[in-house]
Image (spheres, grey):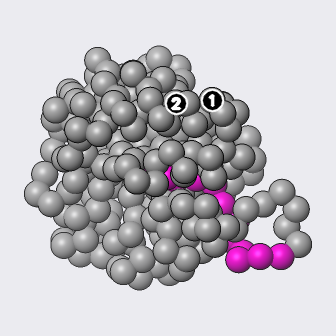
């Protein structure tokens, strides 16, 4: 895997009050204090970010947000800007998650604006891409991913993309209990890396981390991580419990 440090991130979605998030984060910090070779991040709900940062700030666990808006400030009721996220301790932000695309009108174009805003303010984007079940059955996986990557990274320079993590999440495997086979995952991750290579060259393609997201559990993480182009996981449901998530983090 060269210099790519494995990166396991937990997306807590719309779960946990601030108190519950603090309790889970505290339990997680205690369970992963021995971890050195893996980067760990959790993305609680906006309302819990400040409380969770107080728990993780002295630990190896990084803080991320689940979304952001592309303007620094303004009359955008209900939105949160990149500098607000930096202010409460976020290092990462998830952009273009399939649930954002499915329920909230996120497009490749808004994803592109958000990635630009994130890197401009020093936040590392976790850029989510993935195909639906219909796409896969119609053998459109690669064309869909190609479009998402080209449009999502439009006008971004190599320096910007170097801050990025890509998360491949087949929509048909999120919360469904279905997991892509590790061969399917490797094939897609290899394809995504080749897209970065064509666009930005070999060095960046070799250093960019590509996570897999989609029903990741303690019993399948090791097999996934053995694939040469899998550099980590974006974990949903299994990250909500500190004990379960810690088992995923201790995959080695």
Q: Is residue 193 magenta?
A: no
Of 123 and 200, the residue lying toward us: 123
Q: Is residue 148 visible?
A: no
Disc 2 and disc 1 in contact, CB within 8 angstroms:
yes
Main secondary structure found in the magenta portion: loop
Instruction: Name the residue: 74% across, 51% down.
Output: 105
Q: Position of residue 30 (x, y in %)?
A: 36, 33
Of 167 and 88, the residue lying toward us: 88
Q: Position of residue 219 (x, y in %)?
A: 29, 17
Q: Position of residue 214 (x, y in %)?
A: 44, 31
Q: Residues within 10 Å of mark 1 (few under 14, many from 20)?
A: few
Q: Which mark is residue 24?
A: 2
Q: Residues within 10 Å of mark 2 (few under 14, many from 20)?
A: some
Q: Secondary structure at mark 1?
A: helix
Q: Give the vertical position of 250 relative to 176 (above or below).
A: below
Q: Circle 1 sits on which residue?
A: 20
Q: Secondary structure at mark 2?
A: helix
Instruction: Name the residue: 44% across, 19% down.
Output: 178
Q: Position of residue 9 (x, y in %)?
A: 42, 43
Instruction: Name the residue: 15% across, 60% down.
Output: 3
Instruction: Name the residue: 20% across, 57% down.
Output: 4
Q: Quadrant of the C terminus?
A: top left
Q: Is residue 29 left or right of residue 123?
A: left
- Which range of residues does the magenta coloring cover? 62-74
């Amino acid at each position: 895997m060269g210099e790519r440090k494995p990166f396991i991130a937990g997306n807590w979605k719309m779960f946990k009050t601030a108190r519950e998030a603090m309790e889970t984060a505290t339990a997680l910090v205690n369970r992963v204090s021995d971890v050195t070779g893996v980067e760990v991040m959790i993305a609680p709900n906006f309302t819990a970010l400040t409380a969770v940062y107080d728990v993780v700030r002295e630990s190896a666990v990084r803080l991320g947000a689940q979304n952001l808006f592309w303007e620094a400030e303004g009359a955008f009721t209900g939105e949160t800007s990149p500098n607000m996220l930096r202010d409460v301790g976020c290092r990462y932000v998830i952009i273009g998650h399939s649930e954002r695309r499915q329920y909230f009108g996120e497009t490749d174009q808004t994803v592109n604006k958000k990635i630009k805003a994130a890197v401009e303010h020093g936040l590392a984007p976790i850029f989510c891409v993935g195909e639906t079940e219909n796409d896969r059955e119609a053998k459109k996986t690669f064309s869909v991913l190609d479009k998402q990557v080209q449009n999502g990274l439009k006008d971004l320079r190599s320096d910007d993309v170097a801050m990025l993590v890509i998360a491949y999440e087949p929509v048909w495997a999120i919360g469904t209990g279905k997991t892509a086979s590790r061969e399917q995952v490797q094939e897609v991750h290899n394809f995504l890396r080749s897209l970065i290579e064509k666009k930005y060259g070999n060095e960046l393609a070799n250093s960019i981390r590509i996570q897999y997201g989609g029903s990741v559990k303690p019993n399948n993480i090791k097999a996934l991580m053995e694939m040469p182009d899998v550099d980590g996981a974006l974990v949903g449901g299994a990250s909500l419990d500190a004990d379960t998530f810690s088992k995923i983090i201790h995959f080695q």
